[in-house]
Amino acid sequence: MLFWHVPAPNEALLISGSKRQAQDTQFRIVTGHGSFVMPIKQKARMLSLALREAEIAEDCVTQQGIRLTVRAVTVFKVGDDSASIANAARRFLAEQDRMEELVGRIFAGHLRSIIGGLTVEQIIRERDRVAQEVKSGSHTEMEKLGIVVDALQIQEIEDASGYITNLAAPHASAVASQARIAQAKADQLAAEREQEALALKAQYERDTAIKRAGFVAETEQANARAAQAGPLAEARASQEVIEEQTALAQRQADLAARRLEAEVRRPADAEAYRQRTLAEAQRDRAKFEAEGEAYRRTTLATAEAQAVRVQADGDAYAERTTAEAQAAANSARADSLKGGNQELIAAFRVIEHLPALVDAASRGLASANLTVLNGTEGVNQVVAGIVGQGLAILDSLRQSAGAAPRASGLGRFAAGGGVSEGAGAGTGAGAGTGAGAAGAGAGVAGTEPGPAEREAQGGVAGLA
């Protein structure tokens, strides 16, 4: 519209003549939106808020008295707040095109004052410090002008006297020397790399030639093998035939060996086992027979020794009995002669012959065919029975010495039936005791009386 004004985003609308105005300003500031301007009564102007740039090229003298030409650039704009816009409007509204020149002059003055207190080395090494001091020194003035400085950079420092050049000469020489050294090292490294490349190239060419020669050799070898393929195949076929024949011969040999083992070795082993078993059986049988024979002979020898010992015991006992009987006969004879008893004399005659009777009985037993059923004990029982019978006869004779009727009866027993009674009983008393003992011995053996027994019987009969 004709009376409606809208400022751009980087502009501020200044309306003067309006009743609505801020307390500190005599005009109204409109930014970011439009406003109605009364014609004739109000007047509107635009103030640019865009970014501006000012270049500075100023001759400065340092603390050392060295003249330097410093080139710098500053970036600034009008502030966005109402106070800055009002301050900038009062000073630059009519001269907005000269704002860069005016601001550049202000910064140039501060730059001269800051550099005057520094040395060339500090200016070169501390450019940021110089820029910050210039900004800090001009802050108050820029605030009064309503300008905000966004950046200040020192671009170049020129030295007409050559001080900076001379200052950099040692470093430049050192750098040049290092550069030459680095270049020499680079050249040496390049030469080494070039030599290595040449060596690798030569090695590659050699390897290529070797491989090419190997390929040629392999080709020739393959051609030779191809030429020899026919004879080689025939030789391999012949070799395989020989191997098959060898395997067949080996299998035939194994078969023959198995047949030999089955037909010869195993039967031979069985026969050897049978012979060995029979020999062991015969050996065991011979061993058992020898042990049985040895046991039989040992038993017979033991029995014979016992028989000899029994016979010796019987002979000793007979001798003792004979001696005792003779002593008793002598005593009885003396007693009978003293009394004149003829019957006793006859009895003592019998007593005198009693040892002979016992001896005859023992000889009869010795020559008799006796079968002792209970060994040594049975022989001892027989001998004890004979001796007991003899002692019983002796006791009877002693008792009959005191009684005449018994003596006459004893004489009759001795003359008549003593033998038959003794022969029948084998334990009777009187003169027939010897024959009875012989009869008892014969009865035990179950055989006929021997010559000794008959002699004893005859002796008894003679006494009668």
Image (cartoon, rainbow, N blue to C red):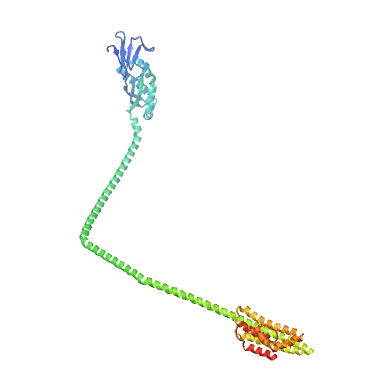
Residue 3 at x, y percent in the picture: 28, 11
Residue 246 at x, y percent in the picture: 29, 66
Q: Quadrant of residue 186?
A: top left
Please name whichever residue, 122 or 10, is drawn nearer the observer in this view of the structure: 10
Q: In the figure, 233 relative to 303: above or below?
A: above
Q: Is residue 335 left or right of residue 273?
A: right
Q: Residue at x 48, y 75 (%)?
A: 284
Q: Is residue 359 left or right of residue 404?
A: left
Query: Residue reaching furthest right?
Result: 339
Q: Residue at x 63, y 78 (%)?
A: 377
Query: Residue reaching furthest top?
Result: 41
Q: The N terminus lies in which quarter of the figure?
A: top left
Please name whichever residue, 23 or 181, is drawn nearer the observer in this view of the structure: 23
Residue 303 at x, y percent in the picture: 59, 80
Please name whichever residue, 32 or 443, is drawn nearer the observer in this view of the structure: 443
Residue 250 at x, y percent in the picture: 31, 67
